[in-house]
Image (spheres, rainbow, N blue to C red):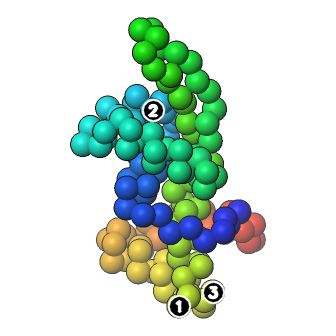
Amino acid sequence: MIFASIILPKKELEIMEIIWSEDRALTNQEFMTLKPELSGAAIQELLDTLVNKNLLSLIGYSDDTSGDCTIFTYSYVISSEVYYLQQLVLSPSMNISKIPCIVRGLCREVCHLENEEIDRIQAVIKKEIKVE
């Protein structure tokens, strides 16, 4: 599923990268621990913005043990794979004919894969698109 084209500002993307890398729901306090250079208020504002953009979902909340603040729990709505795919596909210079070139470049230049590894990836792709 491709979402409407959303190009995230740097700080919002950093927040998304945190939850994608953790690959689990996180609380606002966990984000504060994982991104200590930002204030709690700045992190909360970023989280609220990402919820409003439908990239994060607020899935729960509770009061902390001291009763001083509310702990919110978030999960991602869009995976990193979908986000980066949409950035690629929705790029004004992108067309379907460029995909094999991009995949080849990723395999050989970025990942430094050998032919055997490329064959394994090709098998996964064939399975995903159900090619016999």
Which residue matches tag 2? 28
The reply to whether residue 17 is in sight is no
Contact between labelled residues 3 and 2, with CB atoms less than 8 Å apart: no
Foreground disc of the pair 3, 1:
1
Q: Is residue 66 above or below residue 93?
A: above
Foreground disc of the pair 2, 3:
2
Which residue matches tag 1? 93
Contact between labelled residues 1 and 2, with CB atoms less than 8 Å apart: no
Three-letter amino acid code at disc 2? Answer: Asn
Image quarter of residue 66: top left
Q: Is residue 75 above or below residue 9?
A: above
Q: Position of residue 104 (x, y in %)?
A: 45, 80
The reply to whether residue 64 is in sight is yes
On residue 96, the disc is: 3
* Secondary structure found at label 1: loop
User: Which residue sits furthest left?
Assistant: 37
Q: CA distance from mark 2 to mark 3?
A: 39 Å
Identify the residue at image location x=56%, y=67%.
Answer: 6
